[in-house]
Amino acid sequence: MDPYITEWLNLIIRFAHLIVGIAWIGASFYFVWLDNHLEKPPEWKAEKGISGDLWAIHGGGFYEVAKYKLAPPVMPTTLHWFKWEAYTTWITGFLLLSLMFYVGAESYLIDPRVKDLTQWQAIGLGLGSIIVGVGSYEILVRTKLKDHGLILAVILFTIATALSYGLTQVFSARGAYMHMGAILGTIMAGNVFFGIMPSQRALVKAVEDGETPDSKYGLNAKLRSTHNTYITLPVLFIMISNHYPITYNHSANWLVLMAIIVITAAVRQYFVLRHFGKHKPLVLVGSVVATVVLAYLIAPKTVEITAEQKLHVVTNTQVQQIIEDRCTACHSETPTDDIFTSAQGGVIFSDIASIKQWAPRIQARVIGSKDMPFMNKTKMTDEERLTLSLWLSKNKG
């Protein structure tokens, strides 16, 4: 596919994914907040079957919201379902995953340094991991384990850890992270499709048939909705993770990912508790401390420069030659790379002044995380990285 067309498709699908994702997550967060803030209604409302109500002010108006214990005696003419936000988020996400990591498997998904795969092998492994991950969740959440939250959480976390490790052994680091995101995102959409919507349809049908709705349907929908709220922040992190090689390029990147999943889920727990009026600052403080500790543990090792190496003179000409050979295919005014047709991140190396301008980025991405060149496509050597490091050490500021 023409790289220019691919870039436009990427932009359009990514933008659509962002919009519908905001709509889904916004609605999800709002309803979790709403459910947790409902107060005991006055007696006249309780007699109508209302279990909780809430008053709010927004946009210059007052709102009165009421939740029925099971369902209203008569179904209203208009009933809003809140499902397409989830479905369109999954659809656009899968299209984006397919475009970038399946159509573009050789550029983004396959890293010969990890495992030399064919495009179809990579696609098969990617789709297979999603099926295994989502299938495992669906099987477990339909058993009696659903009534034992902690045990279920431990089992699911163990499966997720195994998948995270396995994916990093066959895919590029970015590809592995994105497939974990695809697994979690599909579980969330599946919770809507397989759990929440069928339960809600059963409740509506019961009311329409003049029957008393079975409370198990509401409980099942709420359980899956609760699972979704804790998965949301990990998925959001994975969505932006490709911008932060300090996480996915670590040698234990699978473990880093699982640590971040735990931290973000804990942050969500803090705010869920706040909804109930329970202020647990230790949960939030613990998450912050854990983040700092994680950042310290995965910090790239400083390149040790010996006294003898410090005496070695690295000229601007040498540096320019390395940058030209290894970096300008993507980072120039007229890139020659077969995938990246415009200077990525707006970084352009045209002369020694521009190299000095981007010195901090070179230090972080080329010397530190070694994320650049992209999957070492131009085969930069460790010796060349050392040469750049020597030059940078003498040209700070």
Image (spheres, helix red, strand yellow):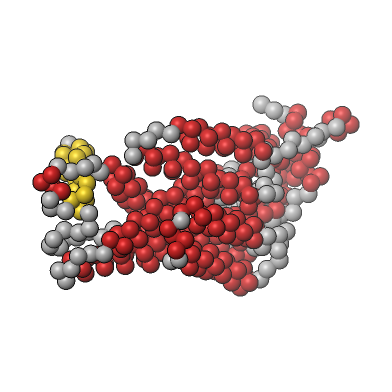
Percent position (x, y) of residue 385? Answer: 76, 43
- Is 183 or 224 nearer to us in this picture? 224
- Decide if residue 33 is on the left or right side of residue 161: left
Quadrant showing the N terminus: bottom right
Query: In this picture, is 97 found above or below 301?
Result: below
In the orientation shown, which residue stands out farthest toward the top? 397
The residue at 82%/33% (across/down) is: 305
The residue at 81%/45% (across/down) is: 383
- Is 218 or 370 nearer to us in this picture? 218
Is residue 39 shown to the viewer in this render? yes
Percent position (x, y) of residue 243? Answer: 56, 46
- Decide if residue 337 is on the left or right side of residue 79: right
- Decide if residue 88 is on the left or right side of residue 245: left
Percent position (x, y) of residue 231? Answer: 46, 52
The count of marks equals 0
Is residue 9 shown to the viewer in this render? no
The residue at 10%/46% (across/down) is: 44
- Is 71 or 120 nearer to us in this picture? 71
Quadrant showing the C terminus: top right
Q: Quadrant of residue 247?
A: top right
Q: Quadrant of residue 158?
A: bottom right
The residue at 28%/41% (across/down) is: 37
In the orientation shown, which residue stands out farthest toward the right? 308
- Decide if residue 155 is on the left or right side of residue 279: right
Query: In this picture, is 341 found above or below 247?
Result: below
Query: In this picture, is 41 found above or below 133?
Result: above
